[in-house]
Image (spheres, rainbow, N blue to C red):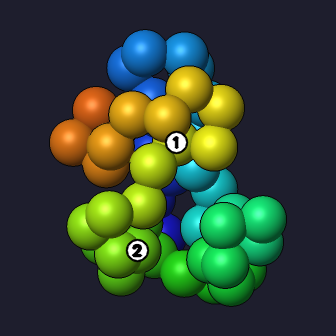
């Protein structure tokens, strides 16, 4: 599964870790995160994230 990085603050969403504080279980692909999820660091939406190569 791909990692995604927030363009605003640099936070990297790693599907292996998920985002348990926001209710996103480890193993959840970025594409499967609800559309209203926001960056846990700066609060921007999913549309501000880019895939990390």
Q: Position of residue 42 (x, y in %)?
A: 56, 26
**Furthest-left residue in view?**
47
Splitting the image into 4 quarters, where does residue 18 fall? Answer: bottom right
* Front position in the image: 22 or 28: 22
* Front position in the image: 28 or 36: 36
Vertical arrangement, residue 3 with respect to residue 48, above or below: below
Residue under circle 1? 39
Badge 2: few (under 14), some or many (20 or more) residues near its Cα, within 10 Å? some
Instruction: Please tell me which residue is depicted at 21% across the width and 42% down the height of the picture.
Output: 47
Residue under circle 2? 33
The secondary element bearing badge 2 is classed as loop
Query: What whole-number distance in Å separates the C-alpha atoms at marks 2 and 1?
Result: 11 Å
Vertical arrangement, residue 17 with respect to residue 42, above or below: below
Labelled disc at residue 31: none
Vertical arrangement, residue 4 with respect to residue 16, above or below: above
Instruction: Please tell me which residue is depicted at 63% across the width and 56% down the height of the picture.
Output: 14
Q: Position of residue 5 (x, y in %)?
A: 47, 34
Instruction: Please tell me which residue is depicted at 54% across the width and 81% down the height of the picture.
Output: 28
Left or right for 20, reference 23:
right
Splitting the image into 4 quarters, where does residue 12 fall? Answer: top right
Circles 2 and 1 in contact, beta carbons < 8 Å: no
Q: Position of residue 7 (x, y in %)?
A: 38, 20
């Amino acid at each position: 599964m791909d990692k995604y990085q927030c363009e605003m603050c640099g936070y990297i969403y790693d599907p292996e870790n998920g985002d348990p504080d926001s209710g996103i279980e480890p193993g959840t692909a970025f594409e499967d995160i609800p559309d209203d999820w926001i960056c846990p660091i700066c609060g921007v939406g999913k549309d501000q994230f880019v895939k990390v190569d």
